[in-house]
Image (tube, helix red, strand yellow):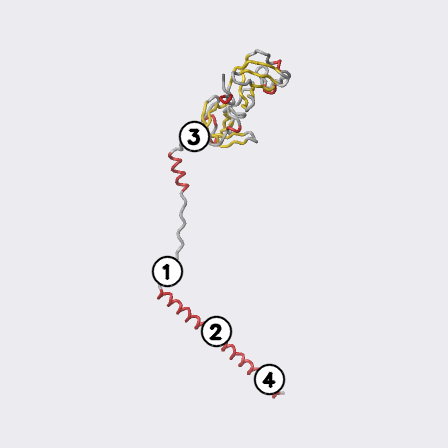
Amino acid sequence: MVQQEEIKSKERYTGTVLKTTLQGALIDIGSEKPGFIHISQVVKDKDPQKAVNSIEEVMEKGQKLDFWVKRVRKDRIELTMKEPLALEWREIKPDMTIKGKVVRLETFGAFVEIGAERPGLIHISELSHSYVRTPGEVVREGDEIEAKVLEVNRRKKQIKLSVKALQELPETLQIEQQGSSKKEEPEPEPQEPELTAMEIAMRHAMEKSEGKASDESNKKSRKSKGTSVEQEELLSRTLEKKVGQDS
């Protein structure tokens, strides 16, 4: 007898139908407790798209059929007749390596069946480190390949893959990348040399001397302006006096 804790999701069992109900059926798969399959998980004529209106259309008590474990709960084992995907969305992670088969080629890349709900896409730029004109130069339909997951978008149902991410970079490209990655170091800005105590004292004395010279120059300028104003006033009074005498 199989212990319930030993049963895992996606495992396949051949079970015997114990009882059918309107909602589903109880199945003996050799575990402590029988498994249960809901009518929504029953497949008719091996076609998951066909609608099943009644359990009796597919199975009857005592019949042996193949089932997969959908989920294991504390109180029951849920079964399905729909073969589970090898990779569920929650199981696909970036950077993981997967194997698959090329199922379709397009001008922009190759689609690879990896056992998920949708095929993954290898863009033409991710097929090789070298330049690729068409995907057919690298892969063909039916090829079994290994690829690395770059991105998973569950909302858009997209899986982006890469072959070149698992390949070693050619030596020529390594040299090119190393050369382009080197950044030119900026030249250090020139710094003023540190001054000695004597040089600092001399500089202060020169600045003080220059300040005095500037003050004296300003005084002379103001004095010169004052003299010029006095001369203009004297000349004006002389002219006015002369005009009065002439008249």
Between 130 and 169, the one lying in front of the other is 169
Q: CA distance from mark 4 to mark 1?
A: 67 Å
* Residue picked out by circle 4: 240
Q: Nearer the viewer, mark 3 or mark 4?
A: 3
Q: Nearer the viewer, mark 4 or mark 1?
A: 1
Residue type at numbered disc 3 = Leu
Secondary structure state at the residue bearing disc 3: helix
Q: CA distance from mark 3 to mark 4?
A: 107 Å
Q: CA distance from mark 3 to mark 1?
A: 57 Å
Name which residue lies at 52% across and 18% down.
Answer: 32
Residue type at numbered disc 1 = Glu
Name which residue lies at 39% across and 52% down.
Answer: 188
**Contact between labelled residues 2 and 1, with CB atoms less than 8 Å apart:** no
Q: Earlier in the sequence, mark 2 or mark 3?
A: 3
Q: CA distance from mark 2 to mark 3?
A: 81 Å
Residue type at numbered disc 4 = Glu
* Residue picked out by circle 1: 194
Q: How many marks?
A: 4
34 left or right of 189?
right
Question: Where residue 235 sits in the image (x, y, percent)?
Answer: 55, 82
Question: Where residue 173 sits in the image (x, y, percent)?
Answer: 40, 35
191 relative to 244, above or below: above
Q: CA distance from mark 1 to mark 2?
A: 34 Å
Image quadrant where one finds the C terminus? bottom right
159 left or right of 204?
right
Q: Residue furthest bottom?
A: 245
* Residue picked out by circle 2: 218
Q: Earlier in the sequence, mark 1 or mark 2?
A: 1
* Residue picked out by circle 3: 166
Question: Where residue 60 sits in the image (x, y, percent)?
Answer: 60, 12
